[in-house]
Image (tube, rainbow, N blue to C red):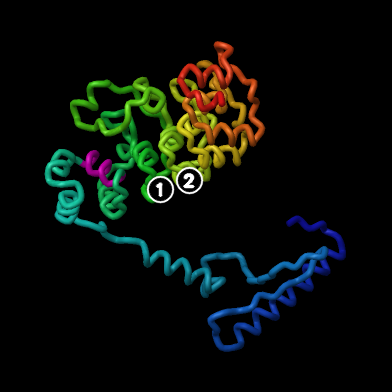
């Protein structure tokens, strides 16, 4: 709500501040209660709740000003951990109990243990292992060419993602180029080989993996952290193309709520498909209906001049024609 700086508005603000301050003083003078009433004030025919909390500039002075803010900082500093949450023996026992003896033994390295903890969202072991790892090697790619950000987005581990955000990583980091045989030799082959999902040429950011796997919480966290939604992968597809191709309407809605407008964004440099064409090609009927409701152009065509119906017919999605 924006108020114009006129004499009437200034008088109203002063009156509201006095009344709210008087109400706060009355509450502090009486005995504490379980519930408190919040005063209301009228402005332009509408009622608003008003709470006045007097604040002063915080400086390291004696005594601290204000005292409640200094007490909050002291309490937060006391919560800061001064030792590792788990020691090595506890980490080994938990890994064997959760993943089994064989898998825990095969991934006994720091990189393998971090990856397993990230996939299963074991927060305490992940923090303990992260503190033992240098910040320069924490986001180094593994044999699959993916970092911990990619693994957290694939498995929708929002808590792990929030911990990684505290290390200030590059949120648009791309999957590096890998050797296709390396995943077979190391045993990390439990991720689908869909040609639109994981390109062997790499260049796939974490947002694309989250959109493809339906990780709505991770997509929301990445967008809130100012990730670039227009970044494209090796096939020149953005995150909204991946979400439309897999039929994750909730993720499409989340991407369309934030600028810039991605409704008609083409895959430049590739087949020039729009999100509507990507949904039609993969049989995502509900997502296609949602895009049409948002105003997507139904006459859009790709580089081969194929529209939604033609692309649906090429993939044998006959339910679109009816």
Q: Residue at x 26, y 52 (%)?
A: 125
**Predominant SS along the magenta part:** helix
Quarter of the image with the C terminus is top right
- Disc 1 residue crowd, few under 14, some 14–19, many 20+, Cα 10 Å: many
Quarter of the image with the N terminus is bottom right
Image marks 2 and 1: residues in contact by CB distance under 8 Å: yes
Give the magenta range.
110-118
Q: Say which of 282 and 212 sits in front.
A: 282
Quarter of the image for residue 80 reads: bottom left
Image coords of residue 50 (percent x, y):
69, 70
Quarter of the image for residue 103 reads: top left
Q: Nearer the N terminus, badge 2 or badge 1? A: 1
Residue 201 vs residue 20: left or right? left
Tell me the element at label 1: helix
Residue 221 marker? 2
Image coords of residue 309 (percent x, y):
56, 20
Image coords of residue 201 (percent x, y):
36, 20
Residue 269 vs residue 26: left or right? left
Image coords of residue 264 (percent x, y):
62, 27
Tell me the element at label 2: helix
Count of marks, rendered view: 2
**Magenta segment includes 127:** no
Q: Which residue is mark 1?
A: 158
Q: Residue at x 53, y 36 (%)?
A: 286
Q: Residue at x 48, y 29 (%)?
A: 245
Where is 71 relative to 146, above or below?
A: below
Where is 18 relative to 101, above or below?
A: below
Where is 28 relative to 292, above or below?
A: below
**Magenta segment includes 114:** yes
Using the numbered discs, state the Cα–Cα distance from disc 2 to disc 1 in whole angstroms.
7 Å
């Amino acid at each position: 709500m924006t108020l114009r700086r006129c004499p009437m508005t200034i008088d109203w603000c002063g009156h509201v501040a006095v009344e709210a301050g008087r109400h706060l003083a009355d509450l502090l003078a009486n005995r504490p209660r379980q519930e408190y009433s919040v005063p209301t004030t009228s402005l332009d025919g509408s009622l608003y709740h008003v709470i006045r909390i007097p604040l002063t500039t915080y400086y390291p002075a004696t005594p601290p000003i204000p005292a409640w803010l200094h007490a909050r900082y002291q309490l937060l500093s006391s919560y800061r951990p001064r030792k590792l949450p788990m020691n090595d023996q506890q980490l080994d026992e938990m890994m064997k109990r959760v993943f089994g003896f064989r898998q825990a033994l095969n991934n006994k390295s720091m990189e393998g243990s971090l990856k397993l903890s990230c996939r299963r969202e074991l927060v305490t072991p992940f923090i303990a292992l992260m503190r033992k790892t240098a910040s320069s090697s924490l986001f180094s790619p593994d044999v699959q060419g993916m970092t911990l950000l990619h693994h957290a987005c694939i498995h929708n581990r929002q808590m792990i993602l929030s911990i990684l955000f505290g290390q200030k990583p590059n949120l648009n980091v791309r999957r590096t180029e890998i050797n296709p045989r390396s995943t077979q030799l190391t045993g990390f082959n439990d991720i689908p080989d869909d040609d639109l999902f994981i390109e062997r040429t790499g260049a796939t950011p974490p947002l694309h993996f989250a959109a493809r796997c339906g990780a709505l919480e991770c997509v929301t966290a990445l967008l809130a952290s100012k990730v670039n939604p227009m970044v494209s992968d090796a096939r020149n597809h953005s995150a909204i193309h991946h979400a439309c191709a897999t039929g994750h309407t909730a993720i499409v809605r989340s991407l369309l709520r934030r600028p810039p407008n991605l409704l008609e964004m083409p895959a430049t440099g590739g087949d020039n498909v729009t999100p509507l064409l990507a949904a039609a090609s993969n049989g995502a009927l509900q997502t296609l209906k949602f895009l049409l409701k948002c105003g997507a152009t139904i006459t859009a065509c790709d580089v081969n001049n194929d529209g939604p119906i033609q692309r649906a017919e090429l993939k044998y999605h006959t339910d679109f024609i009816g």
